[in-house]
Amino acid sequence: MDEEKNEILSEQPEENKISAAAPRGILAFGIVSCLIFGLIGLMLLFVLAVMRPEDVTRARAIFTETGIPPNITDAELFTALRAGVTAAIALFAPLAAGSVGVILKKEWGRRVTLFGAFVFVVWMCVSAMGNPLAAGRAAALIVYPGILIFYLTSKNVVKFFN
């Protein structure tokens, strides 16, 4: 039985041999990451497209509720919100692209996804330090990127991509 299996595997094209040895979870993590980061990126693009200066009133109320009343004008707050959303899009677009690379089993995809996940974790930690009331939310948001970092740096996965 094992001889038949080895013979069948040796007759397979090189691409199939590699995918047969792929660690479990690569495809699942790639798809989930692509969905999460891609959908968040699309939602942020939508927010950026529909954001109006009048929306600042609600944002100011949210900041005040969390204990950080912004001491800036509405125009400055609007500019800061647009900059923050643009920065988030700049993070989530490469994360979604890197996730596609992971699905395609490309080393660049693993590296881009790792870098983006690491940046996201650092961003959430810095945000939590700036607003201790948001620490619980930040902790919840870094769970998936943390798991992703742990998985994509595991010995079998690194070996597979190299």
Image (spheres, rainbow, N blue to C red):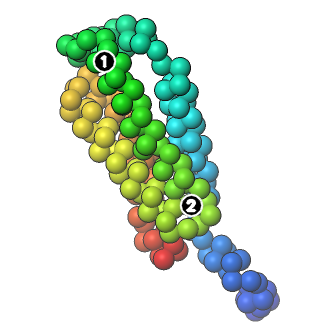
Residue 125: % across, % down: 27, 39
Residue 4: % across, % down: 80, 89
Which image quadrant is residue 79 in? top left
Q: Secondary structure at mark 1?
A: helix
Which image quadrant is residue 30 in? bottom right
Q: What amino acid type should be assigned to the residue bearing mark 2?
A: Gly
Observer able to see residue 152 = no
Task: Kindly identify which numbered label has been placed on residue 34.
Answer: none
Q: Residue at x 46, y 55 (%)?
A: 113
Other residues around mark 2 within 10 Å, as few (<14) / some (14–19) / many (≥20): many
Q: Residue at x 24, y 38 (%)?
A: 126
Query: Label 1, on which residue?
Result: 77
Query: Label 2, on which residue?
Result: 101
Q: Residue at x 38, y 37 (%)?
A: 87
Q: Secondary structure at mark 2?
A: helix
Q: Nearer the viewer, residue 71 or 140?
A: 71
Residue 38: % across, % down: 56, 42
In the image: residue 8, left or right of residue 51:
right
Q: Nearer the viewer, residue 88 or 21?
A: 88
Q: Nearer the viewer, residue 10 or 81?
A: 81
Q: What amino acid type should be assigned to the residue bearing mark 1?
A: Leu
Observer able to see residue 42 = yes
